[in-house]
Image: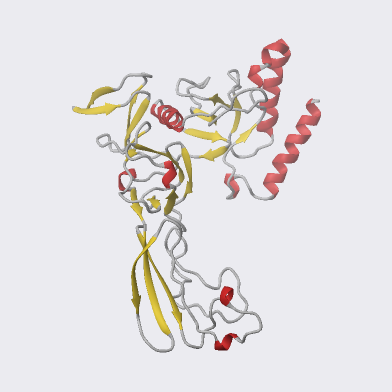
Amino acid sequence: MQNEMKLFLAKIVNLMKDENLFATQGGPIILAQVENEYGNVEWAYGVSGELYVKWAAETAVSLNTTVPWVMCAQADAPDSVINTCNGFYCDRFTPNSPSKPKMWTENYVGWFLAFGYSVPYRPVEDLAFAVARFFETGGTFQNYYMAHVYYKTSNDCAAFLANYGSSSDANVTFNGKSYFLPAWSVSILPDRKNVIFNTAKARFSPPEGRGPVSLNLSSMGKGQAWVNGQHVGRYWSSYRSPSTGCSDNCDYRGAYDSWKCLKICGQPAQVLYHVPCSWLTPAKNLLVLHEELGGDPSKISLSMRSGQKICTHVSESDPPPVDTWKPNKDIAYQEPSLRLNCEQGWTIIAVNIASFGTPGVVIWMCYQ
């Protein structure tokens, strides 16, 4: 069995090398893993289990991937590989050697669905708390199970203020300044002075009116957003398109391809995210972000579309609406007409005729 496993490991590693996928080759793979949570069953095999762990580590390292190897949930991992933490919380995890970084390879964002049981889910506030708490206690790397997140360290020094109590809010003093900490939350101070984010609360009231609401995330980097527990979507505002290639006028003539007509050059593909009104309450709506690259949550804004203009034209030579056509009658002798309406829930508040004659341009405004 060990020989077959060695052949399999070598096969996978060589496939990655052939495609230049390891980080030292310019690729995206920064870590390699051998075994998975074997430490949970190792006890059942006694000494044979301990010897197997050493053999697996030696075999993996001998393949020379040029990136570190890890073993998840393997407290007795040899010095040649990094033992890492899997679980809902890893802030209290300590590697088995001071020379190894504190890494969280599986952060469980939920749990498995099983027949005959209720559906489990993990509040996003708790997930954010767990991540902030992990980095507060010296964490260097973490994965959402199963989405990769990599943090690059720098010489900048940040502060994390944590309230580990599960029911009571608290006020703490740090560097001579008082800070409010909701229960079960962490506040992040990138400059050790100002709170840029707290994992528990980002409350807001929606704009007045009944129109569609959008969330402007242009100040953020990359991540996901939830409003009142509903997933708004993924955002990547820091990833901008090339600054060249767009034009004000695109010639529609000729074969089309995806590079022919471009707009919004040098900007993110999307910064506005629709928040259905049915998700919102009159006050104290909760916004939760999972930010991977860094941003400024204080500049997030909400806007509402309260009106829209619709434009069309009609002339004496236009045919009437199709549903008014009469059998066996030439439509050329029927009078043209124009119907004005708005979508359900909207009302026409103004009608403007831009010109008289043929054709006549009509603009009307709808308001909700």
Q: Is residue 76 above or below residue 215?
A: above
- Number of numbered discs visible in the structure rendering: 0
Residue 52, quarter of the rendered image: top right
Residue at far left of view: 176
Q: Residue at x 77, y 30 (%)?
A: 5
Q: Is residue 2 left or right of residue 256?
A: right
- Of the pair 86 and 185, the residue shown nearer to us: 185
Residue 176 appears at what percent x and percent y?
A: 18, 27
- Of the pair 354 and 26, the residue shown nearer to us: 354
Residue 175, quarter of the rendered image: top left
Q: Residue at x 59, y 48 (%)?
A: 27
- Quadrant of the drawing holding the N terminus: top right
Q: Residue at x 41, y 29 (%)?
A: 129
Residue 235 appears at what percent x and percent y?
A: 46, 49
Q: Is residue 108 above or below residue 209?
A: above
- Of the pair 156 and 256, the residue shown nearer to us: 256
Q: Residue at x 46, y 68 (%)?
A: 263
Q: Is residue 59 left or right of residue 273?
A: right
Residue 132 appears at what percent x and percent y?
A: 41, 31
Residue 340, quarter of the rendered image: bottom left
Q: Is residue 362 above or below residue 26?
A: below
